[in-house]
Amino acid sequence: MTEKLAEWPAHRMHRALVSREVSARELAAAVLRRLDEVERAVGAYVHLREPELVLADADAVDVRLGRGEPLAALGGVPVALKDNMCTRGLPTTCASRILEGFRPAYDATVVERLVGQGALVLGKTNMDEFAMGSSTEHSALGRTRNPWDLGRVPGGSSGGSAAAVAAGEAVVALGSDTGGSIRQPAAFCGVVGLKPTYGRVSRYGLVAFASSLDQIGPLSRDVRDAALTLQAIAGPDPHDATSRPEEPPDFEEALVPDCRGLRLGVPREFYAQGVSAEVRSAVAAAVDLLVEQGADVEECSLPTVAQALDVYYVIAPAEASSNLARFDGVRYGWRAPEPRDYGELFAATRGRGFGAEVQRRIMLGTYALSAGYYDQYYGKAQQVRTLLCREFEQAFERYAALVTPTAPTTAFGIGEKTSDPLTMYMSDVCTVPINLAGLPAISVPCGYTNGLPVGLQVVGRPFGEETVLRVAFALESAADLGRRRPPLLGAQADPV
């Protein structure tokens, strides 16, 4: 049995722990063993905790269970954290040279909540530097590979988190999503990725990329684990003025395996911009399954979606330009050695500390905010963003949720798009509209083509995570795709 423990979802682990079928130490040891076996090939992590510390945390969970204390949903579950979430005493570098050696003095709220449940933190996962990328190739700390095909990317920017879950190196992982950085790697790696409504989860302790777009969410093996993880991290936080003040509902109660009474919209614009025939076919088959589960499906239109990518690449770089101004070599992080004056300190530190993609976006954002161009670019982009939000509002007057592809293609080859930023940016064409509107969305595996997973995206109205989870759970239940595992792990079936 122990050989398969690393493949169990969190809810299966919880049942086994409560029934004393296994111990938290056994679960932790199994995942650490899997990590040791495959991490060299996958490269999901950039900072790992000492195994002894993880096992000590597991022993503490076993002691509490022995006393008869209740166990939280993620208690004893090995988890991974994206490297842009502050962790006390553990490096937080955003996969960037400029934050080399930085160890925060506090935990992000989401980290504090997971640890408070008794989750076992394994380490920090790789990412595109400062979350700017779609392939996890823009990392100063190494390359992450897709467990389904080691010659392909895992997606980005939360590629390390998605790869860790897919490869069995973590049971659940947290990622951040500014333009699709949870959902797109989830699709590429064949796992579930949930981006909550903006404000559902505290951003306190998340290193900011674009403050009006960033959101933290889970990557998991199935929809139930996504619901349980969201339950653990959601809720109001006095440290984040944008967090919703009300307590969240019970997300697990929404997991009904049918879509009876739900009208779903299929916006044609999400199928128009470079979506491959293979992805179209897999998503269409999944939509047919939702109809079989009782959904009423209609085609609809959101015309402004066609401009969403252009709008995103004005607003996001503009906010990044402002947020990343704090990294100057003076207060913390890496600094260029022996500068002659402050001007040289700033220029050399930022020029050598930031990678090419981060520099590109800072320059784009600074230009969009500069005198004479602000109204022409940033102001106009915000106006179009407002139009997009209104179109989504109108759509949700008729539809309970919208269904789209998560990404226009399956995972592409390592190095295939790094020389062409515009082609790389198109990888997020189906996800950035959701961030601009601040909506909840989930990517769930809906099929495979040429041995690679395809993701379907379910989009809900603001704070409508229950409906999003219900539709995703219905598809997961009907498609029965959760038994497949990457070739890296062999042809094992899920033991649930």
Image: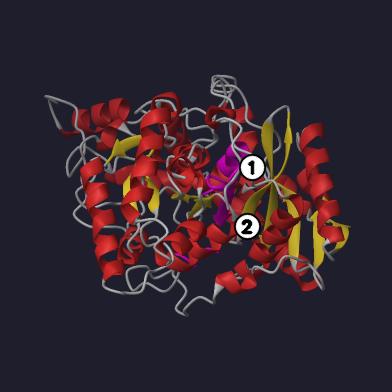
Residue 202 seen from this side: no
Q: Report the residue at 38% width, 28% height from top.
A: 355
Please state the horizontal and vertical placement of residue 213, each as a whole percent of the image: 51, 55
Query: Residue 20 or 279: which is nearer the viewer?
Result: 20
Mark 2 — residue?
Answer: 441
Q: Report the residue at 54% width, 28% height from top.
A: 488
Residue 472 seen from this side: yes
Q: Decide if residue 315 is on the left or right side of residue 428.
A: left
Query: Residue 377 or 20: which is nearer the viewer?
Result: 20
Q: Amino acid at mark 1?
A: Asp
Query: Residue 34 or 145: which is nearer the viewer?
Result: 34
Please say if 176 is above or below 154: below
Please say if 281 is above or below 227: above
Q: CA distance from mark 1 to mark 2?
A: 21 Å
Q: Report the residue at 60% width, 57% height from top.
A: 223
Per the image, label 2 sits on a secondary structure element best described as strand
Q: Amino acid at mark 2?
A: Ala
Please state the horizontal and vertical placement of residue 137, each as a whole percent of the image: 47, 27
Please state the horizontal and vertical placement of residue 331, each as a whole percent of the image: 17, 45
Q: Which quarter of the picture shows residue 485?
A: top right
Span of residues in magenta: 178-202
Q: Decide if residue 32 is on the left or right side of residue 341.
A: right
Q: Which quarter of the picture shows residue 396?
A: bottom right
Please state the horizontal and vertical placement of residue 221, each as a whole percent of the image: 55, 49
**What numbered label is drawn on residue 310?**
1
Residue farthest toward the bottom in the current orientation of the protein: 246
